[in-house]
Structure formats: C-alpha cells, structure tokens
C-alpha cells in the first residue's frame, strides 16, 4: 500500500493522508514529480512505459515521473523516481514548472547529466525501453501519438524555451 500526503491547491500540506488507488476527496491533491533528462551533449532521454500500465501503456515520456510518498518533498521524490526509473543519479535538478490538473499537483524538473547513455536502467513494471533523441528529434517526437500528450501540455513552457 502506497501512502501519500494530501495537499491543498496552493501546495501546502492538508494534514491528512491519501492511499494510492482510493478516490481523492474533492479539494485535496496528490503530488507528482516529473523529470526531463537532458544529456550534457544535448540529447534528451525518453522512457517507454510498460504495456501493462493502466495509463498510457507503451507510450513514451521524457525521463521519469512518479508520486511523492508520505513525508517526501517534491524535489526528493524527483531524485528518487529518476534513480528508480532510469538509474540516473541527479547531482542537481532545476525546477521548471508547476501545473495543477484535477486532483494532482505536478512539479517539473530538468536534470542535466553526463551519464553513460548506455547505462540507463529499466524499472520492472514501469519502463520497457528508452531512446536518446536530439533536441530537434525530441521536439518532433512529442507531437506524435507515441508520446504522453498530457505530459507535453504540462511541459509546454519548457518546450517553447528550447524551440
């Protein structure tokens, strides 16, 4: 059982818990950290979601993402999810967006890394493949039906900044 902190819309703790899979009460939010991974050489990492995932099976997203666990700050969740889903260890993450949708607060980060591009680790049950794309390829790929489109919307300001 995965337990999350409940948040108010302004990002402050609501003083109660949420449980993954249970309905989130109206007016409360859970927190997801999303990390775009950019190699120092200019390429972007895309991870393919497991086909058995309930949301967006088989589609790609930029880097890693996941829910913040109880007691975990958005930044710490980002560092953990990045390591779990890709094997990349973040030295520093740059905050690039905050987005609210329905019952979720999304915190977006950019990780610039010089990791060995062949060292990416797939997380069983989460990811099944990965791609490294140039900036131009990345910008084209996010427009395809192989990319998680709601993620593209959340990271739109970042995408605009690299166009």
Image (cartoon, rainbow, N blue to C red):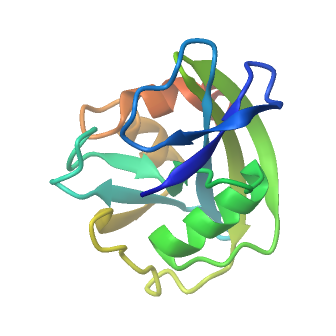
Q: Is residue 159 left or right of residue 128?
A: right
Residue found 38% across the figure and 59% down from its top: 47
Give the vertical position of 129 relative to 6 (above or below).
below
Q: Residue furthest front?
A: 16
Q: For residue 89, which quarter of the picture?
A: bottom right
Residue found 52% across the figure and 79% down from its top: 87
Q: Residue furthest left?
A: 51
Residue found 67% across the figure and 42% down from its top: 108
Give the vertical position of 26 relative to 160 (above or below).
above
Q: For residue 127, which quarter of the picture?
A: bottom left
Residue found 73% across the figure and 56% down from its top: 72
Give the vertical position of 58 relative to 92 (above or below).
above
Give the vertical position of 57 relative to 92 (above or below).
above
Residue 150: x and y in percent read: 43, 26
Disc tally is 0
Q: For residue 51, which quarter of the picture?
A: bottom left
Residue 149: x and y in percent read: 38, 28
Residue 69: x and y in percent read: 61, 55
Q: Is residue 163 visible?
A: no
Quadrant of the image containing the N terminus: bottom left
Q: Which residue is nearer to you in this view: 67 or 63? A: 67
Residue 143: x and y in percent read: 37, 29
Q: Is residue 30 left or right of residue 53?
A: right
Q: Is residue 36 visible?
A: yes
Q: Which residue is nearer to you in this view: 153 or 13? A: 13
Quadrant of the image containing the C terminus: top right
Q: Is residue 102 left or right of residue 15?
A: left
Q: Which residue is nearer to you in this view: 143 or 98? A: 98
């Amino acid at each position: 059982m995965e337990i999350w902190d409940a948040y108010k819309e302004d990002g402050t703790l609501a003083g109660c818990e949420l449980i993954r899979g249970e309905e989130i009460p109206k007016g409360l939010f859970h927190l997801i950290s999303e990390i775009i991974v950019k190699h120092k050489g200019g390429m972007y990492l895309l991870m393919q979601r497991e086909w058995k995932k309930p949301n967006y099976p088989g589609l790609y997203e930029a880097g890693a993402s996941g829910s913040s666990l109880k007691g975990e700050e958005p930044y710490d969740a980002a560092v953990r999810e990045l390591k779990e889903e890709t094997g990349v260890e973040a030295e520093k993450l740059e905050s690039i967006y905050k987005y609210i949708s329905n019952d979720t607060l999304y915190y977006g980060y950019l990780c610039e890394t010089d990791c060995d591009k062949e060292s990416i680790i797939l997380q069983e049950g989460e990811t099944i493949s990965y791609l490294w794309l140039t900036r131009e390829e990345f910008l084209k790929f996010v427009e395809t039906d192989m990319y998680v489109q709601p993620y593209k919307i959340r990271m739109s300001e970042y995408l605009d900044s690299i166009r």
